[in-house]
Image (cartoon, grey):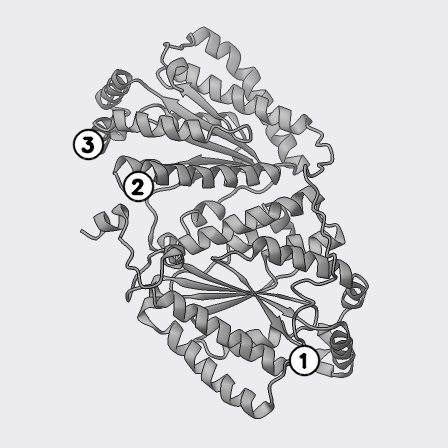
Amino acid sequence: MFEAAEIGHNISKAAYREAVPDLRAALLEAQVNLFEQHKTPVLVLVSGQDGAGKGETINVLYEWMDPRFLSTLAFSPPNDEERAHPPMWRYWRSLPPKGRIGIFAGSWYSDPIHDRIEGLISVKELDARAQQINRFEEMLVNEGALVLKFWFHLTKDGQKQRLKALSEDPHTAWRVTQWNWDRLKTYDQLQDVAGHLLRVTNTAAAPWVVVEGTDDRYRSLTVGQVLLKAMQTKLAEVAPPRAPAAPLVRVDIDGRNVLSELDLTLALPDKAYKDELAQWQGKLSELVRDARFQGCSLVCAFEGADAAGKGGAIRRIAAALDARQYQVNPVAAPTEEERAQPHLWRFWRQLPRHGHVAIFDRTWYGRVLVERVEGFCAEADWLRAYGEINDFEHELLEAGTIVVKFWLQISQAEQLKRFKEREQIAFKRFKITQEDWRNREKWQDYQQAICDMVERTSTGEAPWTLVEANDKNYARIKILRTLCEKLEAALSQLPAGSSHALVQAADQVPGQTSKPSKRKAKKSK
């Protein structure tokens, strides 16, 4: 992929001076239009070899464009806070909102390249990372983002000469350290790894632009022109209504489904409830104080019919936890800030670090439930959300997060009874709104959406637990018991203080001892 960037591209001073004024004016106009239309975020990834002009190009873009609508996001090795979250967490949180441009100096490509050069991951693992990146970038593009990826290339001799020239100039010598000279020794490895990764991530949604980095003027004009044309094309784009290639069609021939088969008559007497509540709350408290829990985290996702008892169940979980250890995240309609980001962004921000618990009262499944039923998003958007959600949860599991998902189901008759009770009790009236009554009219639509959600997102790694919730005592105990059992099973696979990915433990055959990966083995030396 690098041949076209090794032919000696260059631009004369005169040609450069003539081209820059018009380019700057056009870039500023496009940037202001982008901001005013609030149409799309622009992600500019700047990668490449040392000395190829990454920093200089970013500085030129700041000189040419309005810095009020531009931000640079630089990433060094992850700190303790970032290491206690999924690897993509720090990038998820840094995405620019619609109408703004984010320049990524270092990106989600840096770690895979580094790990492969150091021998910490195999080619197969590198390809797996590449596929995750492809799906992530495709999701960003489907959400309306413009993703531009630049790789600045130098030949080996060109890089050596570049570093030498920089080090000999008193004005730039500070930019070259012994680390840069040491990195020159890995040039061939970087070429092999980067060439492979660029090839498998050069997609139609987010293609790579390889730029020769020898001539500063050529490099700057090339990046400026590519950025300008991409923004102008995006601004002029009139997106046609998207139709799914294969529409989802659900037919329950015998009228049975995962919800109709639940026994909603299940109940638990008060005395037994009190005994079991104390038992399982004590067990949960013990599990989250286990030393092994410091190497992982817990996400509890609650969905359910209106008035199904999510709040009461969450309070029983919280009562067993130290207030400093958990966070309850009630989810309502997205804010303006959240609507300017991908639909998963507001949940990415709330993920717990290792040793902590996040409880979500309503979740990322709103896209395939309320947004689907109420028509708040296009059919193509909620259909692709199933795969995006599965990818998201898989990344959580790989990073050591235990994901436990509950759907609380009640009958229509029980829901009506609870609605009327809420209207009569002063401190519960806030829980019942006109929207709750309106949603009852779409009961069957919601039931179909729930069944589709369970079938498409109940994975072996993060299955749904369907809770018979007509009796609150029974539902609360089933939830606490399930949570304790899943947490205990996950912790049993980990040594004290471990942060091994739980997805590997879940795939392991019972009784079999897993072998540490090269990455973990090398880090432990």
On the rendered structure, is 301 left or right of 326?
A: right
Residue 59 shows in this picture? no
**What residue did someone put label 3 on?**
178
Task: Work out how far the residue at label 1 is from the one at label 3, CA to CA, in angstroms.
Answer: 72 Å
**What residue did someone put label 1 on?**
265
Residue 67 shows in this picture? yes
- Numbered mark located on residue 183 in the image: none
Q: Residue at x 44, y 47 (%)?
A: 88
User: Residue most toward the bottom?
Assistant: 271
Up-down relation of residue 220 to residue 17 (above or below):
below
Residue 394 location (% of width, % of height): 47, 52
Q: Are marks 1 and 2 in contact (CB under 8 Å)?
A: no
Identity of the amino acid at label 3? Gln
Q: Residue at x 34, y 62 (%)?
A: 295
Q: Residue at x 53, y 21 (%)?
A: 226
**What residue did someone put label 2 on?**
121
Label 1 crowding class (10 Å Cα cut-off): few <14, some 14-19, many 20+? few
